[in-house]
Image (cartoon, helix red, strand yellow):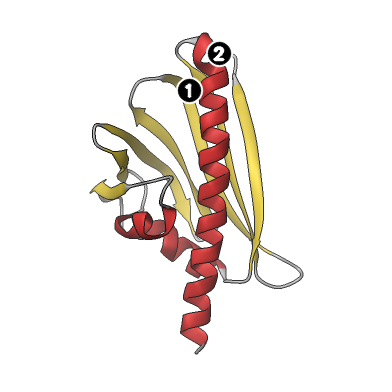
Amino acid sequence: MTVQGTFAFVAHCQADAATVMDVLDDVDNWPSWARPLLLQAQWERWGEGQPGGVGAVRRLGAWPVFIRELILTRDAGGHTYTVISPAVFSHYLGSVTIAESPDGGVEVEWRIAFTPKRPAMAPVLRAMLRTTISGLLQRLVATAERRAQGARV
């Protein structure tokens, strides 16, 4: 298997790791902060011990196109996931990692690696995913910072 696309985006966030994870776990509210990149989101199946735990499936997108993602690992420092449908990838691994920053706050990294089933689709998928993931990361950080500010007021 040859990975056709891999990239990572990193953003500094003034919120703590728990707040960032709370935003990630609150999938039903993703559309409130992720628009126009994401119009609908919900947990299709909850995972072990919590909604976003191992085995959880989140459904993202807009009718008639939805992406179903399976949570593979999850802890206080982030999670990994794979796309289980639509079947456009022969391999897809995404991760969100949250690490304490020496300057305060946290560093949030969103990384993906993928191989499309049809190699000719690689450039289109790469461009689409780069735009989507970088945009989601920016919006995730902004939302976590707003929540953290609201908690301090």
Residue plotted at (49% across, 65% down): 143
The residue nearer to you, when weighing 22 against 55, is 22
Residue plotted at (43% across, 45% down): 37
Residue plotted at (43% across, 21% down): 89
**Taking 16 as reference, is 49 left or right?**
left
Residue 69 in the image, given as x and y percentages of width and height: 36, 38
Residue 29 in the image, given as x and y percentages of width and height: 33, 60
**Taking 123 as reference, is 101 left or right?**
right
Looking at the image, is 116 positioned above or below residue 36? above
**Contact? badges 2 and 1 (CB < 8 Å):** yes
The residue nearer to you, when weighing 44 against 150, is 150
Q: Quadrant location of residue 58? A: top left
Task: Check disc 1 and report the residue beneath it.
Answer: 91
Looking at the image, is 76 positioned above or below residue 40? below
Amino acid type indicated by mark 1: His
Residue 41 in the image, given as x and y percentages of width and height: 30, 48
Amino acid type indicated by mark 2: Met
**Taking 19 as reference, is 100 left or right?**
right
Looking at the image, is 1 positioned above or below residue 32? above
Position of the N terminus, as image quadrant, is top right
Q: Secondary structure at mark 2?
A: loop
Looking at this view, name the residue that lies furthest to the right: 102
Task: Check disc 2 and report the residue beneath it.
Answer: 1
